[in-house]
Image: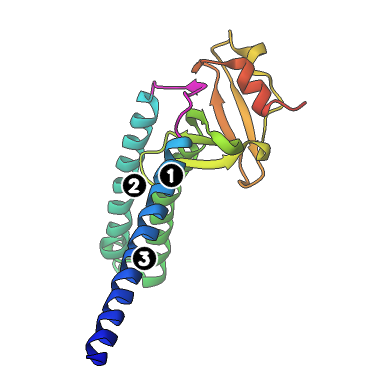
Amino acid sequence: MSENIHVSSDERNTRHGKQSRSQGDHQEQSGKQQQQQQRSDYEPIYENLDQHLYRVAHFCAAGQALLWLNVSDWCYRDLRVSKEKADGSKEHVPAPDWQRRTLGTFCLAVGVLFAGGVHFWSAKRVRRITPLKDGFVKIETSNLVGRQAVVVPCKDLRSIQSAAAVAKSTTGQITLQSNAHRMPFLVDRGGDFYSAELFDKLFHRA
């Protein structure tokens, strides 16, 4: 009889532990969802929805990368040089290995650098800025691949230009310096400043 009571007690403790862990996991998940909900309550203060230029730039970069890749492959396999025969005539013979490898690597590097430059340029062009709670801001960029949004503290961002002063201009850009990123973000003046005053309040520091 005592053994049955002891087993029943162990079963109750096990069930209680599982229920506690389940409740704890549910509360943790609810907390994360609530935090995400709180961090997405605000409306954007800036948007640049005209992304045609960046799509065309990515398309051209992909085309250039494929072109240089084919040229590099041709250099590795079929590059030839002219060689003079004893009778004075010339013939085309395969180029030396070092020459084929050098030119093939150079062409491949040109294609990679061109595509990487376009990606890096678009990754710094701001598409949308949305303030979040707890002093954070979400910056969405114009790149088509890779990470397209970063969340950083507002105190780590600084702009020496005033959005309210240049909001009527449609040319140029505002540089948004970040302590966490080596290169600044670029905010096109041709975009829509929904709240230039709030932009200056958050970022403008002379």
Label 2 crowding class (10 Å Cα cut-off): few <14, some 14-19, many 20+? many
The answer to whether mark 1 and mark 2 are in CB contact below 8 A is yes
Image coordinates of residue 105 in percent, x first then y, are 41, 61
Up-down relation of residue 136 to residue 1 (above or below): above
Taking 28 as reference, is 177 left or right? right
Picture disc at residue 114: 1
Residue 85 badge: none
User: Helix, strand or loop at disc 1?
Assistant: helix
* Residue in front for this viewpoint, 138 or 100: 138
Query: Is residue 113 a member of the stretch shown in magenta?
Result: no
10 Å neighbourhood of mark 1: few (<14), some, or many (≥20)? some
Q: Nearer the viewer, mark 3 or mark 2?
A: 3
| Magenta span | 40-50
- Mark closer to the observer (1, 3): 3
- Foreground pick, 204 / 52: 204
Residue type at tag 1: Phe
The prevailing secondary structure element of the residues shown in magenta is loop
Lower position in the chain sequence, tag 3 or tag 2: 3
Looking at this view, name the residue that lies furthest to the front: 1
How far apart in space, not on screen, are marks 1 and 3 (Cα)? 53 Å
Reading the image, the residue beneath label 2 is 65
- Residue at the image position 32 percent from the left and 42 percent from the top: 62
Q: CA distance from mark 3 to mark 2?
A: 53 Å
| SS assignment at label 2 | helix
Position of residue 140 measured from the top left corner of the image (x, y, whole percent) = 46, 35
The tag earlier along the polypeptide, 1 or 3, is 3
Residue at numbered disc 3:
21
* Quarter the C terminus occupies: top right
The kind of residue tagged 3 is Arg
